[in-house]
Image (cartoon, helix red, strand yellow):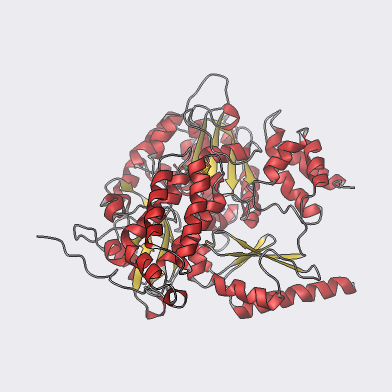
């Protein structure tokens, strides 16, 4: 069994409530942290090697150390619970079943950063979780862990839950801040970064739910001990939400030493491909990261087993690798159509583009249209090249990374599955009723000696 | 006329109190949710203007926001709104078949409302339930692991509830 730092207690009866959570050792991190210097907490997080769990994997301690601290200006911590990247549903699990773990992490982090008013920005559709979080906040407050003069230390802190209203782009941190200010979720041009000018123009840190929850074990065990779990720069544990054609979809906490093969096939995790089918492809880190065919997913281009961690998943760059991203692990079996799947993602990005930059607004529309043509047997070979060209023109030419996120899935699908796109073009009738199947996508990789 | 009850106005005030002095515009998104719930499941121009007046902001500031976010309905919807997810992970688990089944069962297309005003069918993008696919949102609840039989049950339950409330 892998070591669990976050979900260890998720099945304890009543763990959603303060009394049970407290009896199980909860809020010890707050008691410990509030006796420390805020800067020392930031130092522990640095030592832990924790990397942002929202998708970008930026070192959290370093991010915290960038926070500006001008005299007399409030600072804010905002928890990003927007969780809208297709394939990702881990933050939901954590908030739904262990709300106090997040609240505890938020109190410690608020103290470390000097935030007296902390917001949880949650996607609007997770409406029922708002009540769960507000209940946990009220309980923490009744017990003196929130509000004025927490545990007699003189530190004041309130946590508020803010519901979004349906917009993936509000997961991007500057769009989130705009939304929290009661506006459209249009990302801001950076710099200035939120650490200097964020919410209401004040210094702000935005972190993912899982990142902030991980601060609890880091304080409890110490940053150095935390850094011993995992491998290389992939320290600690990571939540993976697994979905698609597997036997056991769900949320798993892994230590980042296991292989992708073990994750997919062992009964402890995904339990293998459903209905006895074969693995065709997988998007290992949420819809924005490159899709990989089975052979490159399980084995790197160097012929080594691929592991479930930041370095190994991105081994080979975009040519032969992918990314850890948000941990949204989407598995496709041999019966699935890559063109169709890519089309649903293209539609998603077109729908979610905020429309500020022409390459993203227009490009995502074009990509969807051309993919629709190909999927319906009306495409030409030149359309495949056109798709490639369009995605190249979106990438890197936009205000926020949604443009890249829309380009990458298309690029990777063409890079690794061009045969399948061509098969659609060359079999305009057949492709309406049949799929290209597994083809050669699972063939073993031969590494030249 | 559109107006919150005294109780709801207290709720509005507590929403505004979550933000620093002068930053009440931040309450706009939560307030629009409340208004949509209270005033018939959608946001009319009158409702939006009223929300603006509560926050002391211009009507255009409200329209800008109401048109940006997908959860706000800008025209009337049925009593029960089925919002079925059809993004990649749900598609892999047969969401298109579920959408097709709902269409034929209710006799409406995506975006339409049944003649009796009971049901509206919409498609939506990933709702963070990919592991429990196929799924749909109904009001504030999620209905997951959908099958044709589950859909039948859900529709029957909605109709039953309707009969009971109209009898009472
Ligand atoms: C289009 C887009 C959507 C994003 N969605 C999310 C999200 O839903 N949740 C999240 O935590 N981060 C999301 N991010 C990343 C955030 O911008 C930000 O990097 C993150 O919240 C930082 O927290 P972390 O360092 O703890 O990961 C998104 C980024 C982009 C460009
Ligand atoms: S890249 Fe797309 S989503 Fe991001 S700011 Fe530009 S138009 Fe908006
Ligand atoms: S794809 Fe349907 S809930 Fe995520």
- Residue A95, position as x, y percentages in the image: 55, 54
Q: Quadrant of the C terminus of chain B?
A: bottom right
User: Can you see residue A119?
Assistant: yes
Question: Does B5 sit above or below residue A32?
Answer: below
Q: Nearer the viewer, residue A189 or B53?
A: A189
Q: Residue at x 40, y 31 (%)?
A: A40
Q: Nearer the viewer, residue A171 or A247?
A: A171
Left/right of residue A52 with respect to residue A443 in the rendered view:
right
Q: Residue at x 63, y 45 (%)?
A: A161
Identity of the residue furthest to the top in this view: A71
Q: Residue at x 53, y 36 (%)?
A: A110
Give the total of numbered labels.
Answer: 0
Residue B164's quadrant in the figure?
A: bottom right
Question: Does A158 sit above or below residue A289?
Answer: above
User: Can you see residue A89?
Assistant: no
Left/right of residue A446 with respect to residue B52 in the rendered view:
left
Q: Residue at x 70, y 35 (%)?
A: B25
- Residue A286, position as x, y percentages in the image: 44, 56
Q: Nearer the viewer, residue A144 or A191?
A: A191
Identity of the residue furthest to the left in this view: A449
- Residue A16, position as x, y percentages in the image: 58, 57
Left/right of residue B110 with respect to residue A105 in the rendered view:
right
- Residue A320, position as x, y percentages in the image: 27, 55
Left/right of residue B113 with respect to residue A11 in the rendered view:
right
């Amino acid at each position: 069994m892998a070591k669990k730092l976050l979900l260890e207690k998720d099945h304890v009866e009543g763990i959603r409530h303060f009394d049970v959570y407290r009896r199980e050792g909860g809020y010890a991190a707050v008691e410990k942290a509030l006796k420390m210097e805020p800067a020392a907490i930031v130092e522990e997080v640095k030592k832990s090697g924790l990397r942002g769990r929202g998708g970008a994997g930026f070192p959290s301690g370093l991010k915290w150390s960038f926070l500006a601290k001008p005299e007399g200006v409030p600072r804010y911590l905002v928890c990003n619970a927007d969780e809208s990247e297709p394939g990702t549903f881990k933050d939901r699990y954590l908030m739904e079943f262990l709300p106090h773990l997040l609240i505890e992490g938020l109190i410690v982090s608020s103290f470390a950063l000097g935030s007296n008013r902390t917001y949880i920005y949650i996607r609007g559709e997770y409406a029922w979780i708002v009540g769960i979080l507000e209940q946990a906040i009220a309980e923490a407050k009744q017990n003196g862990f929130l509000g004025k003069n927490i545990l007699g230390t003189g530190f004041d802190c309130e946590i508020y839950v803010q519901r979004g209203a349906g917009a993936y782009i509000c997961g991007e941190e500057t769009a989130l801040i705009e939304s929290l200010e009661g506006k459209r979720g249009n990302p801001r041009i950076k710099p200035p970064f939120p650490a200097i000018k964020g919410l209401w123009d004040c210094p702000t840190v935005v972190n993912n739910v899982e990142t902030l929850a991980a601060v609890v074990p880091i304080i409890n065990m110490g940053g150095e001990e935390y850094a011993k779990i995992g491998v290389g720069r992939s320290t600690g544990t990571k939540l993976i939400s697994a979905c698609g054609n597997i036997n056991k979809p769900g949320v798993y906490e892994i230590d980042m030493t296991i292989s992708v093969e073990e994750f997919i096939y062992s009964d402890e995790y995904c339990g293998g491909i459903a209905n006895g089918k074969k693995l065709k492809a997988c998007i290992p880190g949420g819809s924005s990261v490159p899709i990989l065919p089975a052979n490159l997913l399980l084995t790197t281009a160097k012929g080594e087993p691929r592991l479930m961690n930041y370095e190994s998943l991105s081994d080979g760059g975009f040519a032969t690798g992918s990314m850890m991203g948000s941990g949204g692990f989407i598995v496709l079996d041999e019966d699935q159509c890559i063109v169709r799947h890519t089309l649903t993602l293209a539609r998603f990005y077109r729908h979610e583009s905020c429309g500020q930059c022409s390459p993203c607004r227009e490009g995502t529309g074009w990509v969807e249209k051309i993919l629709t043509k190909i999927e319906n047997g009306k495409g030409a070979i030149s359309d495949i090249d056109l798709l490639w060209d369009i995605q190249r023109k979106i990438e890197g030419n936009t205000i926020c990374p949604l443009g890249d996120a829309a380009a990458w899935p298309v690029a990777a699908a063409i890079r690794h599955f061009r045969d399948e796109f061509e098969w659609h073009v060359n079999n305009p009738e057949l492709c309406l009723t049949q799929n290209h199947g597994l083809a050669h996508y699972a063939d073993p990789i031969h590494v030249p000696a | 006329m559109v107006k919150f009850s005294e109780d709801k106005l207290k709720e509005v005030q507590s929403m505004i109190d979550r933000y620093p002095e002068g930053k009440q515009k931040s309450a706009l998104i939560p307030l629009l949710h409340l208004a949509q719930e209270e005033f018939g499941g959608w946001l009319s121009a009158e409702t939006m203007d009223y929300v603006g007046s509560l926050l002391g902001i211009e009507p255009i500031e409200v329209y800008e926001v109401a048109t940006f976010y997908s959860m706000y309905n800008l025209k009337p919807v049925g009593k029960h709104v089925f919002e079925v997810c059809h993004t990649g992970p749900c598609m892999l688990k047969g969401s298109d078949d579920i959408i097709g089944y709902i269409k034929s069962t209710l006799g409406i297309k995506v975006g339409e409302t049944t003649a009796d005003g009971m049901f509206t069918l919409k498609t939506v993008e990933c709702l963070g339930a990919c592991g429990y696919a196929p799924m749909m949102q109904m009001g504030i609840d999620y209905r997951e692991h959908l099958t044709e039989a589950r859909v039948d049950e859900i529709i029957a339950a909605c109709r039953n509830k309707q009969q009971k409330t109209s009898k009472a």
